[in-house]
Image (cartoon, rainbow, N blue to C red):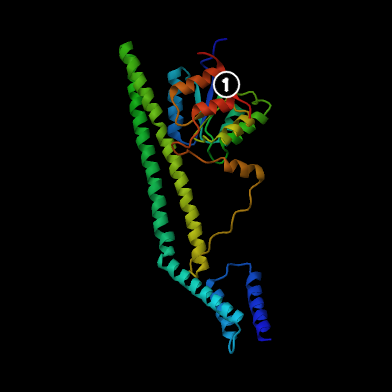
Amino acid sequence: MAVDMNMSILIVDDYKTMLRIIRNLLKQLGFNNVDEATDGSTALHKLREKGYGLVISDWNMEPMTGIQLLREVRADTQLKEMPFIMITAESKSENVVAAKEAGVSNYIVKPFNAATLKQKLTSIIGNF
Amino acid sequence: MRTSAVSRDVSERLGALQKRSDRIDPGEIVEVVEGIMGTMRGDLSAAELDLYAELGSLGKYIADAKAEISSLRPNEIRDQHLPIASDELDAIVGATEQATNGILEAVETIEGLTQDMSPEVAEKVTEAVTRVYESCNFQDITGQRVTKVVKALKQIETSVNGLLAAFGDDSPPAGKPAAPAPAAAAVDHELLNGPQLPGEATTQADIDALLAGGF
């Protein structure tokens, strides 16, 4: 099945430069329908308001962290199947374990490159 | 008789200090020690002499420590050095963010021009632009590292406040410790470590293996 390149992607990060970088890399990969949030609470509100096909979230944010957002998403009957990629500088194995237990779809450690982003997207939504 | 009187006096004074819930001024300890020593007059037994010597050493140790800490000027560390260091670090984050945005804006402009270039040139330019985007990850990493340092400075500030309160400075004492967080929040808090130093970080390959395997 062909990947819907018009799918809406929500990227969540408290660093605006990182939002800009991820948005630009997604654009290079052909995804132009990208929305942004700077913390987990705002992201959760947006997710409940609008239909997104994928979430790409940082971990270390306030007031709601990425792992809390992930747990909220997985606990929400409408959102629980949402693909969720964590992109974070938190690279300890206990973080990865916690994210996996919370139901993360994939995990990218910062600093990352475009090839890694594409590889993780492909593993979730298929080749594009 | 006198020995038991001394013991009783020691017990009473130390007991009074132990019952205190607030921070005890070292000066009060010195006062108690001197008071006890003042009761030890006349012919002293060997045990009393030992106690006398120990108490004398304790009083001198406290007085020396107080003098040494005072010479470090902890109030200057708290009021000047730590705030300056925090401000400088905040400025680093602000400057790198501004510079990164400038770089991103410039390369976005360059990327926008690729449609006017030949396919071969456009491909090379796009590859270079991608590398710039990837390299700009540094701003986020730098920001998080600096935030870790600022948090460490705040811990030092709390300790310095404690020292100042203990050694009689007029400055306000350190705030009350925060109420214990709920268990889940505490566990999550322990997962907020930020970027790891080179050599200590888990690689993307290790993370992929963790995700793929069972725990």
Considering only vertical position in the picture, is B54 above or below B155?
Answer: below
Residue A43 percent coordinates (x, y): 56, 32
In the picture, measured across the screen, residue B92 lies left or right of residue B24, that is left
Q: Quadrant of the N terminus of chain B?
A: bottom right
Residue A25 percent coordinates (x, y): 44, 23
Instruction: Say which element carries label 1.
Output: loop
Q: Residue at x 35, y 36 (%)?
A: B99
Q: Residue furthest front?
A: B46
Q: Residue furthest top?
A: A1
Q: Quadrant of the C terminus of chain B?
A: top right
Residue A42 quadrant: top right
Subunit bearing disc 1: A
Residue B168 percent coordinates (x, y): 50, 70
Residue B39 quadrant: bottom right
Considering only vertical position in the picture, is A30 above or below B184?
Answer: above
Depth order, front residue of B17/A47: B17
Residue A37 percent coordinates (x, y): 52, 32
Q: Residue at x 45, y 39 (%)?
A: B197
In the picture, measured across the screen, residue B191 lies left or right of residue A30, that is right
Depth order, front residue of A113/A52: A113
Q: Residue at x 39, y 57 (%)?
A: B81
User: Does residue B135 appear anywhere in the picture?
Assistant: yes
User: Does residue A107 appear anywhere in the picture?
Assistant: no
The residue that mark 1 highlights is A53
Q: How many numbered discs, if any?
A: 1
Depth order, front residue of B163/A63: B163
In the picture, measured across the screen, residue B10 lies left or right of residue A123, that is right
Inspect the image, locate mark 1, and give the three-letter code of the amino acid beneath it: Gly
Q: Residues within 10 Å of mark 1 (few under 14, many from 20)?
A: some
